[in-house]
C-alpha cells in the first residue's frame, strides 16, 4: 500500500495510527503542500490522505479509509465495533468531530486579527468541548471504553496539541489548537496513552 501525504497532516496521521494499530505498513509518499498535481491525477481531488491499496484501489477521506482498513483487517480488535449500538455511538462521535468540532479552529484561522470577540467565542467553545472529552474519560482509558476505537483515532491527531510543546512545529493550524485547547488532566493522560498505544513515531513530521 502507498499512503499519500503532505507534511504535518492531521488527517494523514489518523490513517497512520490505524495502520500501526493493525500492524500494517504502507509506503509514505510525501507531496509538496503547494503542488497537488500528482494527488489530483491519482484521486481526482486535492486533499490527503489518499491510500493506494495493493489491489490498485484509490481511497480518499481519512475516516472512510480507517473504516476500510478496519473492515479488511479486523484483528487485533475492531476500531468500529460490530455491535450496532456501540458502532453508531462511535460513528456519531466521528461525524461530530469532522462536521462540528473542526468548525471553530477553521473559523479562528479566518477571523484572527480582524474579529477578536468572535475568536474568543470560538475558543470558549473549544474549551467547553475539552471538558466533554475529559468527562468521557472518567473511569475508562479510551473515549468509548477499555479499547482504543475509531473515535480515539479520529480525535487524537487534533487533541494531542493540547499538550504539545514542540517549539520546532510552526504549523499555523497546530498553533491555533495549542492556544485554544486546555490540557485537562484525564485528556492529557489519554494523549500520553494514545502516543504509547499507537507507537506512531515521528508524528510531528506527518
Ligand atoms: N475530510 C478529509 C479532509 C482532508 C484534508 O483536509 N486534508 C488536508 C491535510 S490535513 C489537506 O489536504 N489540506 C490541503 C488543502 O486544504 O489545500 C479527510 O478527513 O481526509
Image: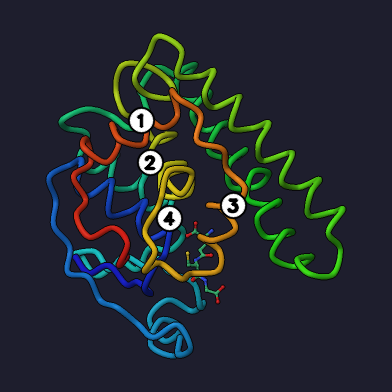
Q: Which colour scheme is used?
A: rainbow
- Left or right, 62 with respect to 129, comes to left
Q: Which residue is drawn at 22% across and 35% down?
A: 197
State yes or no: discs 2 and 3 in contact (Cβ < 8 Å): no
Mark 4 vs mark 1: which is more N-terminal? 4
Whether label 4 touches label 3, CB < 8 Å: no
- Dot 3 surroundings within 10 Å: few (below 14), some, or many (20 or more)? few
Q: Is residue 77 above or below residue 196?
A: above
Q: Position of residue 152 (x, y in %)?
A: 40, 35
Q: Circle 4 is placed at which residue position?
A: 62
* Residue 53 x/y as whole percent: 24, 64
Mark 2 sits on what residue? 153
Quarter occupied by the C terminus: bottom left
Reading the image, the residue beneath label 3 is 179
Cα distance between the residues tagged 2 and 3: 22 Å
Q: Which of 70 and 187 is in front in this view?
A: 187
Q: Can residue 31 be seen in this view?
A: yes
152 or 77: nearer the viewer: 152
Give x and y (percent) for residue 99. 65, 47
Dot 4 and dot 2 residues touching (CB under 8 Å): no
Q: Residues within 10 Å of mark 2 (few under 14, many from 20)?
A: many
Q: How far, Cα to Cα, is label 2 from label 1?
A: 7 Å
Amino acid at each position: 500500500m502507498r499512503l499519500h501525504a503532505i507534511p504535518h497532516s492531521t488527517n494523514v496521521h489518523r490513517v497512520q495510527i490505524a495502520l500501526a494499530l493493525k500492524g500494517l505498513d504502507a509506503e509514505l509518499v510525501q507531496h509538496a503542500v503547494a503542488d497537488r498535481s500528482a494527488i489530483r491525477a491519482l484521486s481526482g481531488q486535492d486533499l490527503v490522505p489518499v491510500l493506494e491499496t495493493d489491489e490498485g484501489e484509490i481511497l480518499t477521506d481519512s475516516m472512510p479509509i480507517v473504516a476500510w482498513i478496519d473492515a479488511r483487517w479486523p484483528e487485533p480488535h475492531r476500531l468500529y465495533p460490530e455491535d450496532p449500538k456501540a458502532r453508531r455511538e462511535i460513528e456519531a462521535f466521528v461525524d461530530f468531530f469532522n462536521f462540528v468540532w473542526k468548525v471553530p479552529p477553521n473559523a479562528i484561522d479566518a477571523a484572527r486579527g480582524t474579529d477578536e470577540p468572535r475568536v474568543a467565542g470560538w475558543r470558549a467553545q473549544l474549551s467547553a468541548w475539552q471538558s466533554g472529552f475529559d468527562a468521557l474519560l472518567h473511569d475508562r482509558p479510551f473515549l468509548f471504553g477499555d479499547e482504543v476505537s475509531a473515535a480515539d483515532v479520529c480525535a487524537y491527531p487534533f487533541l494531542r496539541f493540547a499538550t504539545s510543546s514542540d517549539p520546532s512545529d510552526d504549523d499555523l493550524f497546530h498553533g491555533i489548537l495549542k492556544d485554544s485547547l486546555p490540557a485537562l488532566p484525564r485528556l492529557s493522560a489519554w494523549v500520553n496513552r494514545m502516543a504509547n498505544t499507537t507507537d506512531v513515531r515521528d508524528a510531528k513530521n506527518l
